[in-house]
Image (tube, helix red, strand yellow):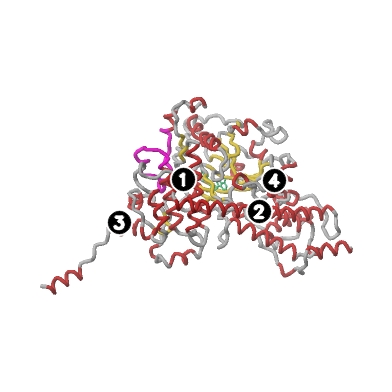
Amino acid sequence: MSVTMETNVATTPLPIPAHFSHAQQSFSLKKRKFPFSSFSSSALFSPSRLSHSLPPRPPSKGCPPVSRLFPQEPLSAWTPLSRSLIANPPPPSLYDPKRPQPFFSQCFTNLGLLGRGSFGEVYKVLSLLDGRQYAVKRSVQRFRNGSDRARCLREARNHECLGPHPHVLGFVAAWEEGGRLYIQTELCYTSLLLHVENLPCSPDEVTVWGYLCDLLHALRHLQTCGFTHMDLKPANVFVTRSGRLKLGDFGLLLEKRTGDGEREKEGDRDGEAEKEDMQEGDPRYMAPELLKGEYGPAADVFSLGVSILELACNMEVPKGGEGWQQLRQGILPSEFTNGLSPELQRVLWLMLVPEPSKRPSVEQLLALASVRKHSWRRHVSLLLQETLQALLSLSQSVVSLGWGLLSALNLPFLPRCDPPTPCTPPRDSWEKEGDLSTLPPSPPTPPSALHDSGRGSVCLGDESVFLPEPLRFDDSPTDRLPSRLSFGSTSTPVSPPSTKPDASPLHSQSRDWLTTLEHLAHTPPSSHPGRSRVAPVLGGTTTTPSFSPIHNHSLLDRTRPASRTLDPNSPPQTPSSRHSRSCCRDQDWTAGASFNKHSFEPKNLLTMFDEAVQN
Ligand SMILES: Nc1ncnc2c1ncn2[C@@H]1O[C@H](COP(=O)(O)OP(=O)(O)OP(=O)(O)O)[C@@H](O)[C@H]1O
């Protein structure tokens, strides 16, 4: 009898807790872009459990196709939408509505595509008004009708209402032209999703706490202004060079109605229409109560919880199915969260409470001891990084100023200062579309566009407001135009910012700068075939206007693509093309692509100067 019982026990499989077995099937590890990422994860997870399937298709924000049956609305002329642009329109010398070129072409130099989303294409631009770099998002589709236009314009208006905040993407201006919306914002390094995917392994816990604190502060600001984001996810968060997070993409922003008719004064008379028009954000990050039509700030807390879970655990967030349900029942995948500290697990658990009324508010989360501790730490670390970055920019500017002075002395070892050969900015897709097909002539280049850019980089102001990016081609996403799919994102950034292990925004900038310094010290005067050889290196890293590659490539000539591939075996060139060629070579040079260090005799700048004086 006992023998029979033992046999039965041995053959009957042990019951497995239902949620655990399901969780194993429902949650998968995120596929990292970096080739060595498997090393970090292999210790914890077997390769067979890695998700090799394509992520779910990004959800569309529900733009119906443009009707072919009904006539389209006539294309609108340029209309400023933001208060900033209405109050301070560009001077007639910069923008003349009588000119055939659109406002965008007259006021900006397009430096290339940063990324595409379901709503818009985002371009990196150089403003000809202040010489700084920005991002401009242009809606992909023209407005289909009045309500579609109103919905699109709401994004711009709400974004402007948010005002400046260190963790909210800075709004600059908005306008409409040709039936499309344009939003000019602060330029960031990349999106958080891309940034994390390009790290060699998942971010450490301190970094994740930093992300959490940044986004909690951003949400607090939104709520103070009476808004709920409704689409919070890593793809809608941007990272500056110093690593500061900025919440962006306010296409689904929901305004809390105060009941005092405030909105009616602004002309939005159909409040209910906005709610009906309310589109759902990404289902992967969506709070459960949204399915019941309960919209509120608690939904943002839930989305933030899912985002932090994704970032901390390197987890592919389920779009549907069992895993999606479990996350909305307060069941966290323990095989992923076990590696986290109990403090972070607790905060995650709190943010993912299914019942919105029991979920802590942003204020309550910020008041937690663990969050307060990390908030303070994050603040200090960002301050240090931004100070370091400002010092780097300052030193770059000092060196470039020194070079400028040397050039002004017209020393014999320095090549003659030929006017730079015009080069072409990357042509954007809308120029090919037909409505703006004529390539504009070189716009009048105000002095600020050439000179302020250099000054801009020295600006010691808080980057969190607007730290102008150095005018460089070597780290511009434009230089790596091949498009790639952004897994798990509704937007398609054009290229990864970097795939190097230490490629944090700040690191890459200082590394490039050090490389340039080292290179300058190793290049004897005799090896400079012309100013173009020296100057663009400086321009490429210091944003000195007259030496800037952007100056060379973008401002003056719009007939040749700046981002073309260089062939070192190309036939000899005419003098004018030689200069262009050297611009481009220098572009590669700063990127370390075609420069052979060993062909130069090492010398330093002091020696060069001494020689020049003796001559
Ligand atoms: N200010 C910015 N600085 C740098 N890159 C940006 C900026 N804004 C957008 N991008 C890039 O462009 C891509 C698309 O932008 P965004 O997500 O805002 O477009 P969208 O159409 O609103 O997307 P979604 O599908 O989320 O609605 C982003 O993933 C990012 O890589």
Distance from the alpha carbon under mark 3 to that under mark 4? 60 Å
Label 4 near ligand 1 (CB < 8 Å): no
Q: Quadrant of the N terminus?
A: bottom left
Q: Residue at x 79, y 58 (%)?
A: 530
**Pointer 4 residue:** 558
* Tag nearer the camera, 3 or 4: 3
Helix, strand or loop under label 4? loop
Q: Is residue 416 left or right of residue 233?
A: right
Which amino acid is tagged 2? Phe
- Sequence order check, earlier mark of 1 and 4: 1
* Tag nearer the camera, 1 or 4: 1
Q: Which residues are magenta?
A: 275-298
Helix, strand or loop under label 3? helix
Q: Note whether 425 is above or below 258 in the view shown.
A: below
Distance from the alpha carbon under mark 2 to that under mark 3? 50 Å
**Pointer 2 residue:** 473
- Sequence order check, earlier mark of 1 and 3: 3
Q: Residues within 10 Å of mark 3 (few under 14, many from 20)?
A: some
* Tag nearer the camera, 4 or 2: 2
- Sequence order check, earlier mark of 2 and 3: 3
Residue 440, picture quadrant? top right
* Tag nearer the camera, 2 or 3: 3
Residue 288, picture quadrant? top left
